[in-house]
Image: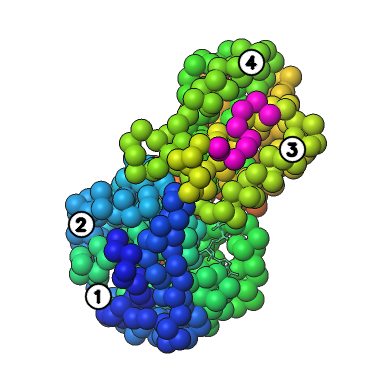
Amino acid sequence: MTNASSTLLHHIGADDVPSDSGAVFALRSPTNGSLVAQVARGSGVEVDRAVASARAAFDAWSVVPAPARGEVLFRAAALLQSRKDAIAEVMAREMGKRLEEARGDIQEAIDTAYYAGSEGRRLFGHTAPSELSDKMGFTLRRPIGVVGVITAWNFPVAVPSWKILPALLCGNTIVWKPAEEAPASGAMFAQALWDAGLPPGALNIVHGFGEEVGAAIVAHPDTRVLAFTGSTPVGRAIAETGGRMLKRVSLEMGGKNPVIVMPDADLGLAVDGVLWGAFGTAGQRCTATSRLIVVGDVHARMIATLVERAKAMRLGDPLDAATEVGPLVSEAQRSRVHGFVERAIAAGATLRCGGGLPTEPSLQGGWFYPPTVIDEVARGSELAMSEVFGPVLAVIRASSFDEAIEIANEVPFGLSSSIYTRDVNQAMRAVHRLQSGITYVNAPTIGAEAHFPFGGVKDTGNGHREGGWGPYEFFTEIKTVYIDYSGTLQRAQIDNREG
Ligand code: NAD
């Protein structure tokens, strides 16, 4: 889907279809405003049709042996590998991620496909002895039905793959609404599954906006499971509807991730990590490093180098290999980010670098924002507490390890965290005390691997994890089976008790 003259359509059953209304929206590059594609703009009508298609496909897909379902995922992984560069280019064009990072995004989906495919030969249940003779008990994992998947734009392939691939492996069928800012690379990911032999209706896509398509998927009585990645307010609303309708809901939401640097740390390593964590993907990661908590004299020894390196980072076209920071996803996102910076400075924080719209002529066509370091950010202030989702690093001072942990934990979010120290005792104390789903030691807050659980605590999540083994529990129902081979009526709790 690289031809700007074509329209990206919904995919329902075996077919690419336009909206009934004929409505489309323009997908434009955040780098230069060029048209990437026209995209069909769906509504509840297409959602109804897609859910019906997923329901119809469920009966056949759910009885395909799990190892055979896994083989479809293996073939999709190989196709994604062969199409990696082409998908990465579309991703870079549609949402501004640098090519190298876009390839990483797709690699995450490839890794997930291999992991999920191999789960087809596990999907373990339990066995346990019965309390009665000649009787046994065991559990099976059963598919649930139609899963509604709603995803954010910042990982257009990796994040959907975390939901879609395990859900399919477990025998469910899907209606997916990709983010409206990045639907084209997501459609190429789905194409690999269809080309790999996924039967029609097992994965349906309805493109469009949250209130029009996402809300219809959430409220549809036949989407028994909802898997969402996005902002906390939207996740909360989805959980409310899902709760009322007794749906199973998994939510991956915002972050405000801290890096603590202790005085004994390797400061060169810490600077490298903070730059990558804060400014990789232009800070538009749920796991982005957005707070640097410097302890004791680290401030004096680290900030000047950090600022010098941040200033030197090269903004530009994500398709250019020399670019270090691409554009923000939209004008609205850039205004939002700039607003945080302006208010922080007005509140008394110190701007160390960045903080203004670029003036270079080559950057005028896109939504670029420079790496920004804001020092002396007060605890409890807006910039210390709110997710920015842009290349803005808030520096906060702490006088001790204990105070640093307290600062790290005082935000509502809890996705990722990090500590730089050479003291193993201190590192382990931090691992236990930091309130986050992920903690790194001597590495930045970003860099999840497909076979480890990913997710957050507090307002970041609702207790589920993606990646690793958790999704196979989330996307299945447990069936307990008892087999009595005694040939007599045996009554548990009664016949094996005296009196
Ligand atoms: P968003 O919540 O605005 O949108 C996410 C998705 O939800 C989009 O597909 C959108 O169309 C849809 N949506 C919006 N309103 C809806 C509604 N009323 N009903 C149903 N669906 C609706 O999020 P965003 O701003 O696009 O993405 C950035 C956010 O995503 C950040 O907060 C970031 O931290 C978070 N994120 C979290 C993770 C994670 O795994 N924790 C990963 C990536 C991004």
Secondary structure beneath disc 1? loop
Foreground tag (2 vs 1): 2
Residue at left 31%, top 50%? 89
The Cα atoms of the two marked residues, 4 and 3, are separated by 22 Å
Taking the magenta stretch, the answer to whether it contains residue 358 is yes
The Cα atoms of the two marked residues, 4 and 1, are separated by 57 Å
Foreground tag (1 vs 3): 3
Above or below — where is 473 with respect to 498? above
Q: In this view, does 208 lie to the left or right of 434?
A: left
Q: Which amino acid does label 3 sit on?
A: Ala
Ligand 1 within 8 angstroms of badge 1 C-beta: no
First in sequence: mark 3 or mark 2?
2
Ligand 1 within 8 angstroms of badge 3 C-beta: no
First in sequence: mark 4 or mark 1?
1
First in sequence: mark 1 or mark 3?
1
Where is mark 4, residue-wise? 298
Above or below — where is 51 with respect to 410? below
